[in-house]
Amino acid sequence: MKIGMEKTKLKPFDVASMQTLQPILTRIGVSCSKPRLATTSTPPGRKQMPRSDLAKKNSPDSNTEPAPQAAEPVRVAAVDSKAVDADALARAQAGDHHAFAHLYSLHKRRIYSLCLRMVGNAAEAEDLTQEAFLQLHRKIATFRGDSAFSTWLHRLAINVVLMHLRKKGLALMSLDEAMEPTQSDGPGRSFGAPDLALAGSIDRLALERAVGDLPAGYRLVFVLHDVEGYEHNEIADMLECSIGNSKSQLHKARLKLRDALRTSLERGGQR
Amino acid sequence: MNSDREEMSCQEFQAQLPELVGSGEDMSKHPHLQSCENCKALLADLQTIADAAKQLLPVEQPKEDLWDRIDAAIRLEEGALGQEE
């Protein structure tokens, strides 16, 4: 039994941009207004449009981004340099506005979704997506291809979100604090009877809600690891915390989710 | 060593879980789990959650006018840069 380990291995980050960040997330602030995530479903088995077709489209609103498949989720690393329109990238780096618009169309869903999951609020997520693409526009000429473009962009967007959360400074929980055991810190400790198994009973909406209700620190690590597929060493690097801290945060996040999902199931059973 | 692991209480076992799970170790043969249905159920739930998380991959679409906002912001920046030069 290897929990959450069966996922596509990501390529190492280009960490250069992270080095400019101030110490991250000594205090993480997010809105706790019980965010509800959008749930537009993608039909299973939607085919990815061939690159030749992608190249014909210039409008960023043509929704040409490859759709994730429900049965086999698309990882960030799956869209590697081979899948990125290298020609559009080169032209965008040279200042071609249409090419940049094309890159936007390719990556907007992934970047917006990442922002949405990390902040749990659609308006904020759009602002952060805008900021991420503005930063991309400023920095795209500096991309040297040391990592896949999608990974580089993804990392840039994460930086934007982390900076935003830090600026908000609502101070819900620090990563270090989360490592310290407290009297109340025991989400889902399970010393009782295994009376309600989750297997086969989790629906996407319930999980979305439970993730949205997680404390900021837990949610960040859960989204980065279990949803986005980053490794603990990569998360530790991004959040400037220890690997053990990342593991602990993730474990506590899953325990909290377990509590929330079991509660949800119990309520459902009582109806 | 194995004997120590077998005699582990649930509390001790669960205290080690973040590291055990995070290391990717196959825990199905862990001595404590051979005799503890409770911790086995806990692990199964955590596995279920980790698996279900993969359903949460990108499917959301930003509003159609977001590009217009970005485009306008880019042109504004370019205009400002042009004036500086």
Image: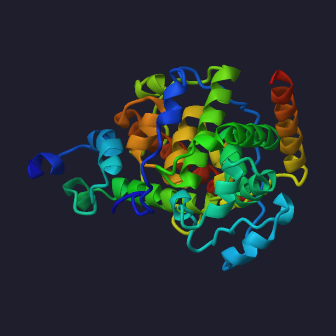
B61 relative to A110 in the view: left or right:
right
State which quarter of the image contains the C terminus of chain A.
Answer: bottom right
The residue sitting at 45% across, 62% down in the picture is: A8
Q: In this view of the protein, which residue sits in the foreground, A110 or A52?
A: A52
The image shows residue B65, relative to residue A41, as above or below, that is: above
Residue for point 79% across, 72% down:
A56
In which quadrant of the rendered view does residue B84 lie?
A: top right
| Viewer-side residue, A217 vs A188 | A217
Residue A259 x, y percent position in the rendering = 55, 46
Residue projecting furthest to the front: B85
Looking at the image, is A26 positioned above or below residue A57? above
In the rendered picture of this protein, how many numbered marks are placed on residues?
Answer: 0
In the image, what residue occupies the spot 65% across and 34% down?
A160
Q: Is residue A238 left or right of residue B60?
A: left
Q: Position of residue B5 (x, y in %)?
A: 17, 48
Residue B14 in the figure: left or right of residue A72: left
Q: Is residue B49 above or below residue A117?
A: below
Residue B4 appears in which quarter of the rendering?
A: top left
Q: Position of residue A155 (x, y in %)?
A: 56, 43
Is residue B30 visible to the viewer in this orientation of the structure?
yes
Residue at (45, 55) in percent of width and height: B46
Front residue of this view, candidates B27 and A49: A49
> In the image, is B53 to the left or to the right of A237?
right
Specify whether residue A206 is in view. no
Q: Position of residue A214 (x, y in %)?
A: 61, 39
